[in-house]
Image (cartoon, rainbow, N blue to C red):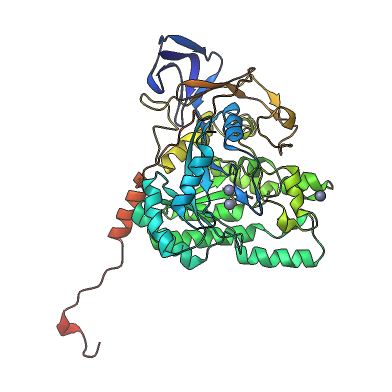
Amino acid sequence: MTKVIKGGTVVTADRQYKADVLIDGETILEIGENLKGDETIDASEAYVIPGGIDPHTHLEMPFMGTTAAETFESGTWAAAAGGTTMLIDFVLPGEDGSLVNAVNEWHRKSGKQICSDIGFHMAITGWSKQIWEEMAQVVDMGVNSFKHFMAYKGALMVEDDEMYASFQRCKELGALPMVHAENGDIVAELQKKYLAMGITGPEGHAYSRPPEVEGEAANRAIMIADAAGTPLYIVHVSCEQAHEAIRRARQKGMRVYGEPLIQFLTLDESEYFNKDWEHAARRVMSPPFRNKEHQASLWAGLAAGSLQVVATDHAAFTTAQKHMGDGDFTRIPNGTGGLEERLGVLWTEGVDTGRLTPEEFVAATSTNIAKILNIYPRKGALVPGADADIVVWDPSISKTIAASTQKSVLDYNVFEGRKVTAQPRYTLSRGEVIFAWGQNSQPQPGRGRFVPRPPFSSANRALSKWKELNSPRKVERDPMNIPSGV
Ligand code: URP
Ligand code: ZN
Ligand code: ZN
Ligand code: ZN
């Protein structure tokens, strides 16, 4: 059974051209002119782009005494409706501390629910011989990236020596270390300080996590990755200080990647000073939203290539859950949503304003992360042989974002009232239409698949070779020339 996506403009990370896309079953068979298939999907007046990949989600995540409300089913449905066909969710170890059990638990939770494909990252939240051993098993299970929290003191945070040990293990295994870059010790002190001053509302969240705290941690993580000889991926980059650290590292030839969020690019810190507690609390996440200068820096980074990926960090807590932080901002569950909105908002605020080209949009929403996570060109590419994860992206469909019409189970939307100027006409996952504009039929839960990601990406191998060639070596000296006693 073949399908042809007809009459559109194919946009990849490096060019745009008029072509039809022929799909055979789950994969792309051919791209060219005048192709025919058993079924035709109309792409006239539209772009044909690789399905979005959101590399940062927390569906049903147990966190801060509660569990994120977005399920794997509602999350993947929301993603499909917004043009995202794959997401990578963060696995957190449970009470027993076992990484392998945690990955199995994530499979158990997600398997029957997912409407589109997923992958996992693993969180390293402590350090032990068991963790060291299990990291290898986790890589064998198709998880090639490990996130380290430098914040959330007393909960998920790891110390520098633990991070260094884990990064070295990542290097041995060909895996990619990731960091949540915030100085957790200083955040904890600032939280105490502002609570003592009587600042108990969501504004205290922003005050206690200034950009310097993020920039310092980003610099520290970059230094530790360099010492361990491994690439580094910095998640949810929110500010110039962290971007500057990444930019500088990259200029020195270090393989450091930065991931701003769609929220950070378009929502600012004034949200936390809103008189309506619920409005502000719904936007509490770490790091927090920043001011317009920081936003400008992130946009410039995407255009310049110093930042590579736009994600959401979709960690969705209901208004009722946010109320756990009544009278104490440190107890407001941290997280916001964006899975359904990421592509539409990035197109509207990026491509429509001329800050990004359509090709840069594709690079930031799918291609770059597929390369970084070593699943390219199976994902993130429009080439024969790739999975037919494709979006017919229609720049004539506009809508106003509203919680009342979203697929997410949340009772609000942080982008409420924002107009977006393009939307998916069709979203295809491995050749199947899983969303069509104007229809509301949800794809079959459980049709999605887990996509294993192999270790030893090209960047990993290149850096290891470079480090090997430039590693410290003992200088062999003629014993006759060594003074006695030395
Ligand atoms: O506030 C956030 N970002 N919540 C999700 C957990 C994390 O730190 O990524
Ligand atoms: Zn984080
Ligand atoms: Zn996150
Ligand atoms: Zn309340």
Q: Which quadrant of the view contains residue 37? A: top left
**In which quadrant is the C terminus drawn?**
bottom left
- x then y, percent, for residue 261: 60, 43
Lateral position of residue 316 relative to residue 106, left or right: right
Q: Is residue 238 visible?
A: no
Residue 237 as seen in the image, left or right of residue 413: left
Give the residue displayed 53% in from the left and 35% down from the top.
Answer: 365
Number of marks in the image? 0
User: Residue at coordinates 84% horizontally, 48% vertically from top-left?
Assistant: 275
Q: Closest to the observer: 222 or 439?
A: 439
Residue 324 percent location from the top left of the image: 75, 52
**Residue 476 at x, y percent in the picture:** 20, 74
- Residue 187 against residue 346 in the figure, above or below: below
Q: Is residue 2 above or below residue 234?
A: above
Is residue 334 visible from the viewing direction of this image?
yes
Direction right: furthest residue: 275
Quadrant of the rendering where the N terminus is positioned: top left
Report the residue at 65% width, 54% height from top.
64
Image position, residue 8 (x, y; %): 50, 16
Q: Residue furthest bottom?
A: 485
